């Protein structure tokens, strides 16, 4: 173990969390609502604990409800939490396909254009979010048993979500590369390979809704990806996947538990003076 690289990996992960929190704050701002970074961080870490509950929907619900406690209007709270989650997963898939294009082309014997089509479909779905919000609200109502007012999604909020999450996935890949170096003493391959391996395993693990935190699924996909991309042998890949799970769980869960222990201490803010009519600034 080379602990310097492992600690550096943790620093990059925490910086990635900060980037995602700021991205969410800016998405909320597109509804003309405001939220302190300190409150956003508390909400983000506490709601993230919901991904360890089967169904994953609790993460989105918690983020929205806690945001309302700091006077973020219901439409902005619910809409921003859904947009952040949906775009995060969609961009993770798109970034994984793009970063892993070389491996995909090799495995498909030159038919990687299928991956390009998938990226186009994913991005098309993301850009269609402003028009899909009523359908998303209907699905959320069926899942939760309660009406959820999502209002009108400001188009610029989607652009902010895409940019912020694309940067975050690259940062996650960089932290994974540092972690691999720290665990096995070297990091073969380039940054794009680690971005692809990490993003693909995370997204697939997340989409297995009935498994808390995608435990087992993420590790299986990550082990296969590391071998397929030539980054590690089978035994090395198993160790890397196990250490990655433990390390990231510590970095993700401990802050959430810390804020829970403090009672989150969310302070209400003055409501926004501008009506939330869904218009952009």
Image: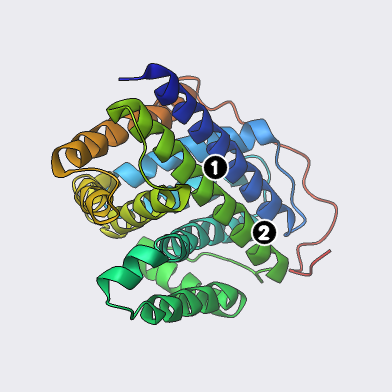
Residue 36 has which mark?
Answer: none
Q: Secondary structure at mark 1?
A: helix
Q: Which residue is tagged 1?
A: 66
Left of 278 or right of it: where is 90? left
Name the residue: 59% across, 80% down.
131
Q: Which residue is tagged 2?
A: 160
Q: Is residue 102 above or below residue 251?
A: below
Instruction: For marks 2 and 1, give the CA distance.
Output: 22 Å
- Across and down, in percent, residue 119 comes to 46, 74
Q: Nearer the viewer, residue 75 or 53?
A: 53
Residue 209 found in image quarter: bottom left
Name the residue: 54% across, 39% down.
16
Mark 2 or mark 1: name the one nearer the start of the chain: 1
Residue 39 found in image quarter: top right
Name the residue: 44% across, 48% down.
190
- Across and down, in percent, residue 55 comes to 29, 55
Q: Nearer the viewer, residue 213 or 234?
A: 234
Say few, some or many: other residues with alpha carbon within 10 Å of mark 2 (under 14 / 14 to 19 / 20 or more).
Answer: some
Picture quarter with the N terminus: top left
Q: Secondary structure at mark 2?
A: helix
Q: Is residue 240 above or below residue 81?
A: above
Name the residue: 49% across, 62% down.
91
- Across and down, in percent, residue 176 comes to 40, 39
- Which numbered disc, 2 or 1, marks the residue closer to the eye? 2
Picture quarter with the C terminus: bottom right
């Amino acid at each position: 173990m080379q602990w310097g690289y492992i600690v550096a990996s943790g620093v990059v992960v925490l910086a990635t969390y900060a980037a995602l929190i700021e991205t969410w704050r800016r998405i909320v701002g597109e509804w003309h609502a405001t939220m302190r970074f300190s409150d956003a961080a508390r909400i983000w870490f506490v709601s993230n604990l919901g991904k360890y509950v089967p169904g994953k929907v609790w993460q989105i619900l918690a983020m929205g409800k806690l945001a309302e406690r700091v006077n973020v209007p219901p439409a902005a709270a619910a809409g921003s939490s859904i947009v952040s989650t949906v775009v995060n997963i969609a961009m993770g898939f798109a970034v994984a396909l793009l970063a892993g294009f070389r491996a995909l082309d090799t495995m498909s014997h030159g038919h990687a254009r299928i991956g390009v089509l998938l990226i186009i479909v994913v991005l098309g779905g993301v850009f269609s979010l402003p028009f899909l919000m009523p359908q998303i609200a209907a699905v959320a109502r069926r899942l939760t048993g309660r009406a959820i007012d999502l209002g009108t999604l400001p188009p610029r909020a989607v652009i902010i979500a895409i940019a912020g999450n694309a940067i975050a996935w690259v940062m996650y890949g960089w932290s994974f590369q540092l972690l691999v170096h720290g665990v096995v003493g070297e990091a073969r391959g380039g940054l794009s390979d680690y971005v692809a391996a990490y993003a693909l395993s995370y997204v697939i693990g997340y989409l297995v809704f009935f498994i808390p935190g995608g435990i087992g699924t993420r590790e299986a996909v990550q082990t296969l990806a590391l071998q397929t991309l030539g980054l590690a042998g089978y035994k090395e890949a198993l160790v890397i996947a196990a250490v990655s799970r433990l390390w990231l769980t510590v970095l993700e869960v401990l802050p959430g538990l810390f804020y829970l222990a403090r009672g989150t201490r969310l302070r209400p803010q003055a409501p926004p003076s501008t009506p939330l009519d869904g218009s952009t600034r």
